[in-house]
Image (tube, grey):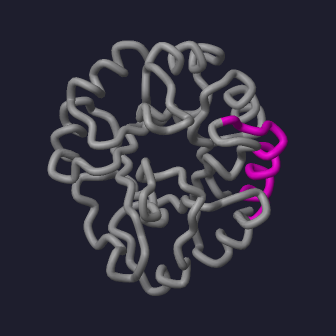
């Protein structure tokens, strides 16, 4: 069955709904330019609403060790999802002892990664559009046809532009066994919609059953 990550959770309704609906991961964004960004304490308060449950993923952009350390002092994370810092992924993994998800922007076949570079999982999404203020969460899809024949070096997650209406088709077209959504389940930028979260998870699970 397809696994689902609901990213950019920043309020109790989104957190509770994602868990109740069967999300396999819940994600917190620690990147201030994002409308989904949370402080370490806010993430800790949300995560504390349920002991256990799905793994918590922390999203960072070009993070320093100090920045990650500051977050982990407040909230327990199970996965670090990282944009950039390609020369430091192995060091970060060793320093914190946590799995690393490496975000990869895709426009063409040439962008598909052939090595993990120290990551345990890849997150594939479209490269950000011109003048974008953040590397992900831009509701943009890449051409899924470029994945045909690609040999993934590690497990991967399909992201970027997914919605309750297209996620089933995306899974069938790409063979993805894990998907990641943020803006596709929001009614306004940074504000999750409970009904969209439920619909997304149900559609993804049904498509991958």
Please give left or right for residue 201 compared with residue 25 in the image: right
Q: Quadrant of residue 48?
A: top right
Does the magenta segment cover residue 124? no
Query: Where residue 16 appears, x then y in whole percent?
Result: 72, 26
The structure residue drawn at horizontal position 80% and vertical position 44%, both measured from the top left corner, is: 198
Q: Is residue 167 left or right of residue 56?
A: right
Give the magenta-colored segment's residue range: 191-207
The quarter of the picture where residue 61 lies is top left
Where is residue 78 drawn, in percent x and y?
43, 32
Residue at point 46% right, 20% down? 39
**What predominant SS class does the magenta segment belong to?**
helix
In the image, what residue occupies the spot 69% across and 21% down? 12
Quarter in which the N terminus is drawn: bottom right
Rendered location of residue 80, percent (x, y)? 37, 38
Up-down relation of residue 117 to residue 54 (above or below): below
How many marks overall? 0
Q: Is residue 157 above or below residue 49?
A: below
Compared with 204, 10 (above or below) is: above
Front-lying residue, 120 or 184: 184
- Residue at the image position 84 percent from the left and 42 percent from the top: 195
Q: Quadrant of the C terminus?
A: bottom right
* Residue farthest along the front direction in this orientation: 131
Foreground of the two, 202 or 68? 68
**Above or below, comparing residue 96 to residue 146 in the picture:** above
Front residue (pair 81, 128):
128
């Amino acid at each position: 069955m397809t696994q689902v990550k609901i990213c950019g959770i920043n309020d109790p309704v989104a957190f509770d709904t994602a868990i109740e609906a069967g999300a396999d991961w819940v994600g917190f964004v620690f990147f201030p330019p994002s409308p989904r960004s949370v402080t370490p304490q806010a993430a800790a308060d949300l995560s504390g609403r349920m002991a256990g449950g799905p793994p918590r993923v922390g999203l960072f952009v070009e993070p320093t060790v100090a920045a990650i350390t500051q977050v982990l002092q407040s909230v327990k994370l199970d996965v670090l999802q990282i944009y950039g810092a390609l020369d430091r992924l192995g060091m970060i993994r060793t320093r914190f002892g946590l799995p690393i998800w490496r975000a990869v922007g895709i426009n063409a076949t040439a962008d598909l990664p052939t090595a993990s570079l120290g990551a345990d999982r890849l997150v594939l999404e479209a490269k950000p559009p011109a003048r974008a203020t953040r590397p992900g969460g831009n509701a943009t899809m890449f051409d899924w046809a470029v994945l045909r024949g690609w040999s993934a070096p590690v497990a991967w997650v399909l992201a970027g532009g997914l919605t309750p209406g297209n996620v089933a088709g995306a899974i069938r077209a790409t063979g993805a066994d894990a998907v990641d959504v943020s803006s596709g389940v929001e009614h306004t930028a940074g504000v999750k919609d409970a009904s969209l979260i439920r619909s997304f998870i149900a559609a993804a699970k049904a498509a991958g059953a």
